[in-house]
Image (cartoon, coloured by chain):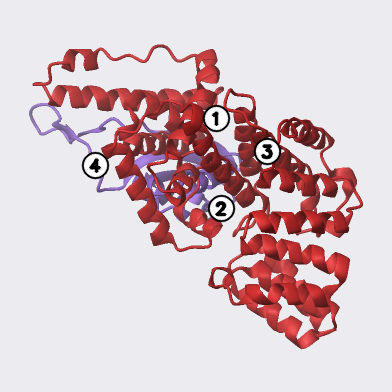
Chain colours: A purple, B red
Amino acid sequence: MSQYLLLLYDNSSNLRSLSPEEMQKAFEKYMAWSKMPFTKGGKRLAEDHGRIMHPAPATGKSRVTDGPYSETKEVLGGFYLIEADSYDHAVELTHGHPHLEYGGAIEVRQIFGT
Amino acid sequence: MTAYLTRLLGSARLDLAEEIVQEAMLRALQTWPYQGVPENPPAWLFRTARNAAMDVVRHESMAERKQPNVKAQMEWDPGPLDDELLNDNLGDDELRMIFMCCHPEIPRDASVALSLKIAGGFSVREIARAFLTEEPAIAQRLVRAKRQIRERNLSFDLPRGAELKQRLTAVLEVLYFVFNEGYTAHEGEDLVRRDLCFEALRLARLIASSSSAEPRVHALAAVLAFQSARLPARVDALGDLVLLEDQDHSRWDRPLIDLGFHHFNLSMQGDEVSEYHVQAAIASIHVQGHPDWSAILTLYDQLCEMNGSPVVALNRAVAVAKVRGPAEALAAIEPLIANPALREYYLLLAVRGHLLLELERREEAAACYKAALQCRCSEPERRLLRRKLAECAG
């Protein structure tokens, strides 16, 4: 079994337009997926503006700028760690994640050495 | 939650209250799947929503520095949020919300839609289904209703006296619709949405136990309790629809039946006989196991006189079929077929199909079931319709 990191990019505008009933359904789907046996854990990233530290120049310190957080772009919202037999298997498992159904993107990366 | 926020922000900010609730739920949706559901989910949501509301108020106060009472606004603090406070005020806030939504200055149809949206959590599409109308019409009603609340500064306080009586009529109608949608969902995988049924029943009982209680409130509570009692038997293990005559009575919820009779008895106080009284009487016969269809038909005759709705007439026709046979029932249905409001109503077609099938008019029955399948209805009902269609082939 190998380990994979799922990076979830948010698309809040889609979710925001759901009715309370639809949100309830979405919620149940998200919770169900988070309880799958192959899901080993996950964390939500705070909404506060992340900052980017740029490569330090030859002399001086790294330049720090505001991160890409913005309403118009997809923001990295959180991540999950899952276990799967292969990369293809990991992708297959991730197909069932409701995040994709509600307009969000998920990047799948294998943990090196697992 | 919306009711609570509306009380804090004022009835003119109903839109804002709704937005904040939406944001709070979105936040929950985006965080709980990762870190688990918090110990006290409602408190978490309330806290998130209230903080957002306070942010908005503070932000606006700072922007309007010229306001003389800006200091007062910035010091606005609704107090600590503990469980007891939540429980005590929640019921009141909800009652207030639903009574406000049914204010006489708002047209009846609009206030029903508004209550369904805010207190019932329905989407515009679901409300359109319940009314047998179109979505844009409902959306318009909601916009107008909110504008009226804003412009006329309608109060969030509970009405009294004669005003209360009027308001109550509209409120009971809303609860009835909410229950109806839960009893037989108009689309989707689940036939029954018990949370809607229980929500309607809960609110009915809330009113019945308040100073706004009247016999007809008890009558409605009785209807809802009786119908809810039979919910477990309406669907089988596969989620398929079980017809009344095939239902397993042992699955009926006895405490709910008892509750129904409790409210039914209370509804008998005084001389008032509302539609809900008649419906409660019909429901009370059904929960006694072997229904006396003649008695039910007599009650439906009475109900039809009080309520000219074609849906009631359709239900009456089913009783006619049981007492006088399918041919008479078909005749009773004839005038309903021309009614434009029922054109997309699959039940009319399904009932007609059923009666035709009983009369061995298989081709006509099949045509009805095919037409019924073209209408919008829930998946379990769709499966039943397909089975009946197959039966027509013999």
How many marks can you see? Answer: 4
Q: In terms of depth relative to the viewer, which is nearer, B296 or B45?
A: B296
Residue B117's disc is: none
Towards the viewer: B385 or B95 = B95
Q: Residue sitting at 81 percent across and 75 percent down?
A: B328
- Rendered view: B328 above or below B192: below
Which residue is labeled 3 in the image?
Answer: B272
Distance (Cα) linking label 2 and label 3: 61 Å
User: Circle 2 is placed at which residue position?
Assistant: A93
SS label for mark 3: loop
Badge 4 and badge 1 in a common chain: no
Three-letter amino acid code at the position of disc 4:
Ser
Answer few, some or many: residues within 10 Å of disc 4's Cα (few below 14, many 20 plus, some between 14 and 19): few
Of badges 3 and 1, the one in the foreground is 3
For disc 4, the chain is: A
The amino acid type, in three-letter code, at marker 3 is Glu
Check the image and name the residue furthest to the bottom.
B363
What is the distance, in whole Å, between disc 3 and disc 1 at their CAs?
A: 48 Å
Q: Distance between the residues labelled 4 and 3?
A: 61 Å
**Chain at tag 2:** A
- Residue corresponding to mark 4: A70
Q: Mark 1 lies on which chain?
A: B
Which comes before the other along the chain, label 3 or label 1?
1
Marks 4 and 3 close (CB-CB < 8 Å): no
Under circle 2, the secondary element is helix
Q: Which of marks 4 and 2 is in front?
A: 4
Who comes first in sequence, dot 4 or dot 2? Answer: 4
Q: Does residue B99 appear left or right of residue B237 in this picture?
A: left
Task: Assign the C terminus of chain B to one quadrant of the image.
Answer: bottom right
In the displayed image of the protein, which residue is found farthest to the front? B271
- Per the rendering, the mark at residue B37 is 1
